[in-house]
């Protein structure tokens, strides 16, 4: 089979398209033919070995796929510990879900990891209550674009999205954001500028929930904007800055919470994924939830896909076509 293999850690240049033996299904596994592979920002960390779980070489990246178990089998979307950037994968069918006919490969890939992340950020971690204000950092991204829509659907009083260009801010607003903010303000010489912009976007009030995946000054400014009993849920480190220490006394003194979330912990509790996918796929099929397509790349152009993702040239969900 054709696959993307990494034999050394680094940037997009370490991903090589090679021919490898087909994987062999182990106990409790099935062999799936992949029609589409999903690309996530976390994959760019995986190639560097800079994410939460240490990586072992050689490896095939990729945490999600759409495919079939044999010719003519039902189309499923699945989650993986790795191996998705390939034409075939052997994995447990327990972490796969049937794709409705009205849902495309790209849409299914958008919800299986990024959609379930957005679902759990709002429901499991932040415990969003009706009427609360929500800030979605990177509101035009894969997780963010879905979180904006879900927050509005679930009764958020005001949804504020950050996005790095006028086009991305317009996209976030078209998905339901009530206001948008340029995250470049967090790099300003005035460290309070980003906090002030978030509060201004919320009618001068502090915010209740922040979904944060950048780190650094964006995290600092977001935390400062939280109201008492507000929750910041951190689920990424796209800024590639050293993690900030948590000041417990400051949290106590302001009655704020900082919560971490990593979808990998749901793999051992698949019923949590069933719950999210059982709601998300029907919403997409009915047209009530709109995944944003960020582009479909040939597998042979995987380096370009990662370069575009890291350079913030994309919005929504990126996918790979293993047949090309």
Image (tube, rainbow, N blue to C red):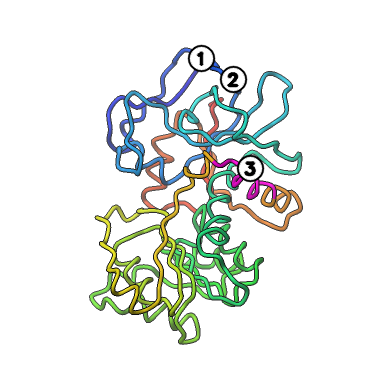
Q: Position of residue 172 (x, y in %)?
A: 54, 65
Q: Position of residue 81 (x, y in %)?
A: 47, 33
Q: Nearer the viewer, mark 2 or mark 1?
A: 2
Q: Nearer the viewer, mark 3 or mark 2?
A: 2
Q: Classify residue 228 by image quadrant.
A: bottom left
Q: Is residue 182 left or right of residue 291?
A: left
209 w.r.t. 27: above or below: below
Mark 3 Cα-neighbour bin, 10 Å: few <14, some 14–19, many ≥20? many
- Label at residue 31: 2
| Label 3 sits on residue | 108
Residue at point 64% right, 44% down?
274
Of 116 and 287, the residue lying toward us: 116
Of 215 and 179, the residue lying toward us: 215
Task: Name the secondary structure under disc 1.
Answer: loop
Sooner in the amino-acid sequence: mark 2 or mark 1: 1
Residue at point 62% right, 34% down?
96
Of 112 and 93, the residue lying toward us: 93
Sooner in the amino-acid sequence: mark 1 or mark 3: 1
| Label 1 sits on residue | 22
Magenta extent: 269-278
Task: Name the secondary structure under disc 2.
Answer: strand
174 w.r.t. 285: above or below: below
Sooner in the amino-acid sequence: mark 3 or mark 2: 2
Residue at point 67% right, 56% down?
289
Residue at point 27% right, 76% down?
191
Q: Is residue 155 left or right of residue 55?
A: right
Q: Is residue 282 left or right of residue 252?
A: right
Q: Position of residue 29 (x, y in %)?
A: 58, 22
- Separation of marks 2 and 1 at Cα, in angstroms: 9 Å
Mark 1 Cα-neighbour bin, 10 Å: few <14, some 14–19, many ≥20? some
């Amino acid at each position: 089979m054709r696959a993307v293999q990494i034999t050394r850690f680094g940037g997009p240049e370490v991903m090589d398209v090679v021919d490898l033996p087909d994987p062999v299904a182990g106990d409790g596994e099935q062999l799936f033919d992949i029609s589409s592979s999903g690309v996530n920002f976390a994959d760019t960390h995986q190639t560097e070995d800079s994410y939460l779980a240490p990586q072992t070489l050689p490896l095939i990246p990729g945490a999600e796929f759409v495919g079939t178990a044999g010719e003519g089998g039902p189309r499923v979307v699945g989650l993986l510990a790795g191996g998705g950037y390939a034409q075939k994968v052997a994995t447990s069918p327990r972490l796969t879900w049937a794709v409705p006919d009205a849902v495309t490969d790209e849409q299914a890939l958008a919800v299986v990891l990024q959609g379930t992340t957005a679902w759990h950020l709002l429901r499991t971690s932040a415990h969003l209550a009706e009427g609360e204000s929500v800030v979605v950092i990177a509101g035009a991204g894969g997780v963010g674009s879905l979180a904006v829509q879900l927050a509005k659907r679930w009764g958020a009083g005001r949804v504020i999205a950050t996005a790095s260009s006028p086009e991305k801010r317009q996209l976030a607003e078209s998905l339901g954001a009530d206001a948008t903010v340029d995250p470049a303000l967090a790099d300003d010489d005035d460290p309070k500028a980003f906090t002030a912009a978030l509060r201004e976007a919320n009618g001068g009030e502090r915010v209740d929930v922040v979904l944060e995946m950048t780190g650094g000054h964006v995290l600092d400014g977001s935390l400062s904007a939280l109201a008492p009993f507000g929750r910041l849920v951190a689920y990424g480190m796209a800024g590639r800055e050293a993690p900030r220490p948590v000041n417990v006394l400051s949290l106590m003194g302001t009655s704020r919470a900082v919560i971490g979330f990593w979808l990998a912990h749901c793999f051992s509790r698949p019923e949590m994924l069933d719950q999210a996918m059982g709601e998300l796929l029907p919403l997409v099929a009915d047209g009530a939830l709109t995944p944003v397509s960020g582009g479909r790349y040939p597998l042979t152009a995987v380096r370009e896909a990662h370069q575009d993702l890291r350079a913030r040239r994309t919005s929504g969900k990126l996918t790979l076509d293993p047949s090309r």
